[in-house]
Image (tube, helix red, strand yellow):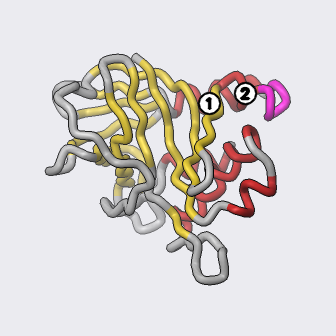
Amino acid sequence: LVLISIFSFTACKEDFNPNVTPVVTDVSIVGQWKFSSLGAITNIKTYEATLDEIKKFSGNNTAATDSIASMYAYEFKSDSTYIAGEDRGKWRMSSDKKSVILTSTQSVGFDGKYQVITYQIASLSNTDLKLAYKKLVADANGEIETDGFTDFIYLVVGYYVIQIKGNAVEANAATSLQTTISLKR
């Protein structure tokens, strides 16, 4: 839970190298979105773990799963502000409309600056929104590379999902990983 909490408040760049093709749509993200699932997209397979599956995997730890559901429940307001659990801040769409950038007005990182999270919009409809983090790719030795603490957290959460829905063989065979969050209106 601590890693997932840190994961939600870490900074990242607006560079993705995505596994998924980001979408551009006329559908607005303005409104309230509830957590649906965590996902992991690898070069081999896509995994989705619902809140019930996460709860079952964590031994019915209701407090932990409630925390995940709250942390990833977003309200995007028309005045370009957002609320996500205990966090609040400003949101904006990227110039190409393929990602949404959140700048917290409450959470400060190790560098003393407000935290920035950039999500790629993997899919968006009137009822469903899938947000994706930066894609991580294996190096020449087959190890998935991380460029620091933020990427390490993405990797841990992605492997957590694979652990829930897959197995160690699949996790070890992956040469790329991209973590996703699915939301519903």
Precedes in sequence: disc 1 or disc 2? 2
Residue 45, x across and y down, in percent: 61, 47
Q: Amino acid at mark 1?
A: Ser
Label 2: element kind? helix
Residue 121 locus on image (x, y percent): 34, 41
Q: CA distance from mark 1 to mark 2?
A: 15 Å
Determine whether the residue tagged by mark 1 lies in a helix, strand or loop. helix
Residue displayed at 68% across by 42% down = 1
Q: Is residue 87 above or below residue 29?
A: below
Front disc: 1 or 2: 2
Mark 2, Cα crowd under 10 Å, few <14 / some 14-19 / many 20+, is some
Q: Residue furthest right?
A: 59
Residue 53 image label: 2
Residue that protrudes farthest toward the bottom in the picture:
140
* Residue at point 57%, 30% (across, down): 37
User: Mark 1 = which residue?
Assistant: 67
Q: Nearer the viewer, residue 58 or 86?
A: 58
Q: Vertically, is 162 above or below 75?
A: below
Q: Quadrant of the C terminus?
A: top left
- What is the magenta range? 56-60
Task: Name above or below for residue 149 compared with residue 185.
Answer: below
Quarter where residue 39 is shown = top right
Amino acid identity at mark 2: Glu
Residue in the image at 65% along x and 33% along y: 49
